[in-house]
Image: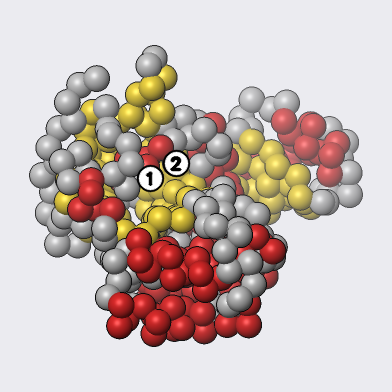
Amino acid sequence: MSAPSKVRCDQTDWAISARRLTRRFGSLTAVNKVDLDVPKGRIYGFLGPNGSGKSTTIRMLCGLLRPSAGGARVLGLDVSREPEAIKRQIGYMTQRFALYGDLSVIENLQFMAEIYALDRRERRSRVAELLARYDLAEQRKQRAGTLSGGQRQRLALAAATLHRPRLLFLDEPTSAVDPKSRRDFWESLFELADGGTSILVSTHYMDEAERCHRLAILDRGVKVADGSPAELAAALSVNVVEVQAEEANRARLALREQAQVFSVTQLGLRLRVLIPKDQPDPHDWVQARLREAGLDGQARPTEPSLEDVFVAVTQKPELTQHAG
């Protein structure tokens, strides 16, 4: 394992700054030369399929895993040389409930307050504040193991923010909750960001990724896109054509056989067709291919969605440029 390089970056605007961050496990390169700049006071997303390197990157940035090469600074601290100092200033929440099921809600928070060495005079008021903020006051004496998925999620967020961290890492935190709990959770994240907390959150949900101020898309350990959702859509080197057809599946199969078609996705009676921008008049071209197949359908140009971006860059990364 080569020695991690010292990262020299201007930390004025960044909560996290990484250069060529790499992690190898034997012959497997889980994270490969990732450059990353996470703004302060913003929600920055990691979007990618399972095995794309999201969790490994987060563990390195938290000081839990030493980089094999490259390096990063988190809150101005070097992840390789100052991991313990980093851990004291961050919050970390995983997709699995990591608190104590046999303890009550308030016992979990009191225990975490001791772990974080909060001043004794502050502990009671801080715990009471978080119980109220995350709507857990009525469950304060309930054992954590009996809480609903949404309640567990709110308790885990309360525990992760108990010590007022400047930076919060969330590793797929909404994977086991219902849509309303996910929405409420994101409202809490925006409140934290408005209060100055920097947040890095990994997800595989497109609707969550669209909520982020900026995001990176990871694929097989490589960062294949980086920018705001709008910037990523604008940088995509494909046109998107929407097709409305009664025989949508037949239309999908016919278009899928065309060499000029990069991807076809069916949504009920609609198709989203991705075609490289060097194809002139893409919607007219699609309309002509439908006629040739004896199919009725209406093709029209449309704006790319984040899902279109994700499909394009994870299957063929050169179809986007990194948005600055």
Mark carried by residue 198: none
The amino acid on which the numbered mark 2 sits, given as a three-letter code, is Ser
Q: Where is mark 1, residue-wise?
A: 58
Q: Residue at x 49, y 47 (%)?
A: 47
| SS class, disc 2 | helix
User: Outermost residue, top direction?
Assistant: 27
Q: Nearer the viewer, residue 90 or 297?
A: 90
The answer to whether any part of residue 163 appears in the image is yes
Q: What is the quadrant of residue 251 in the picture?
A: top right
Q: Is residue 26 left or right of residue 308?
A: left
Q: CA distance from mark 1 to mark 2?
A: 5 Å
Q: Nearer the viewer, residue 125 or 13?
A: 125
Looking at the rendered structure, the number of numbered marks drawn on it comes to 2
Quadrant holding the N terminus? top left
The amino acid on which the numbered mark 1 sits, given as a three-letter code, is Ile
Whole-percent x, y for residue 36 in the image:
29, 46
Q: Residue at x 84, y 39 (%)?
A: 249
In the depicted structure, whether residue 38 falls above or below residue 254: below
The answer to whether any part of residue 73 appears in the image is no
Q: What is the quadrant of residue 197 in the picture?
A: bottom left
Q: Where is mark 2, residue-wise?
A: 55
Q: Residue at x 65, y 54 (%)?
A: 176
Whole-percent x, y for residue 87 in the image:
28, 53
Whole-percent x, y for residue 77 in the image:
17, 51
Asked if disc 1 and disc 2 are in contact, CB closer than 8 Å, the reply is: yes
